[in-house]
Amino acid sequence: MIEKPYDIKHRCYQFSKEIIGFISTTNYDRIYFSIFDQLLRSATSIGANVVEGKSGSSVKDFKNYYTIALKSANETKYWLCLVRDTISVEKDKIKDLIKEADEISKIIASIVINLQK
C-alpha cells in the first residue's frame, strides 16, 4: 500500500497524478470523452483550489477556495461513479480512486467546518 502524504496539498497533487494516469491508460469510445474531460477538470481542480486557498490573503479567501475544492472533490466522486457504472474499466483501480476522492472530500469538509467555528 502506498503511503499517502500528510499534507492535503500534496495528497491532492498525488490524486491528480493518479487520475491523469488512469485516464491516459483507459480505452474508451468517443461518446465518453466529455465524461473523462469533466473528471480530469474536477479532479485537478481540487488541488489547484487548495493551493490557491493556502496563498489567500484572508481567512475568508482561504475558506472560499476550500469550499470550491470540496465541491470539486464531490463532483469528482460523481464522475468516477459514472465511469464505474457505464464503462468497462479496472474495478479495483476505480474503487481506489473513489475511496481516495471520498477521503480527500472528508478532510476538506472537516477543514471548512472547523473554519466556521
Image: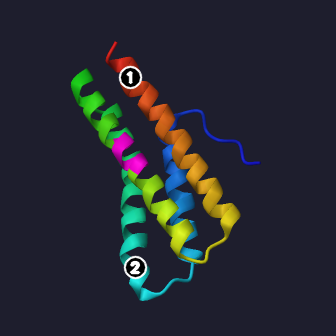
Residue 114 coordinates in the image, percent (x, y): 40, 18
Q: Which mark is residue 74?
A: none
Residue in front for this viewpoint, 20 or 82: 82
Give the overall secondary structure of the magenta segment. helix
Q: Work out which quarter of the rendered image holds the C terminus and state it.
A: top left
Q: Residue furthest front?
A: 85
Q: Which residues are magenta?
A: 69-74
Q: What is the three-letter code of the residue carrying label 2?
A: Phe
Q: Which residue is mark 2?
A: 33
Q: CA distance from mark 1 to mark 2?
A: 35 Å
> Disc 1 or 2, which lies upstream in sequence?
2
Residue 58 belongs to the span the image colors magenta = no
From the top left corner, tell me how far across and down residue 106 is, in percent.
50, 35
Outermost residue toward the top in this view? 117
How is the model colour-coded? rainbow
Q: Is residue 59 above or below residue 86?
A: above
Q: Give the structural element (helix, strand or loop) at label 2.
A: helix
Residue 58 in view (yes/no): no
What residue sits 66% from the left and 62% below the top?
Answer: 93
Binning the other alpha carbons within 10 Å of mark 1 as few (below 14), some (14 to 19) or many (20 upward) gives few
Q: CB of mark 1 within 8 Å of CB of mark 2? A: no
Residue 109 in the image: x percent, y percent? 42, 31
Query: Any mark on residue 113, and which?
Result: 1
The residue sitting at 59% across, 55% down in the picture is 97
Image spot of residue 69 (x, y percent): 36, 42
Q: Amino acid at mark 1?
A: Ile
Q: Which residue of the protein is positioned furthest toward the right in this rendering?
A: 1
**Residue 3 appears left or right of 55:** right
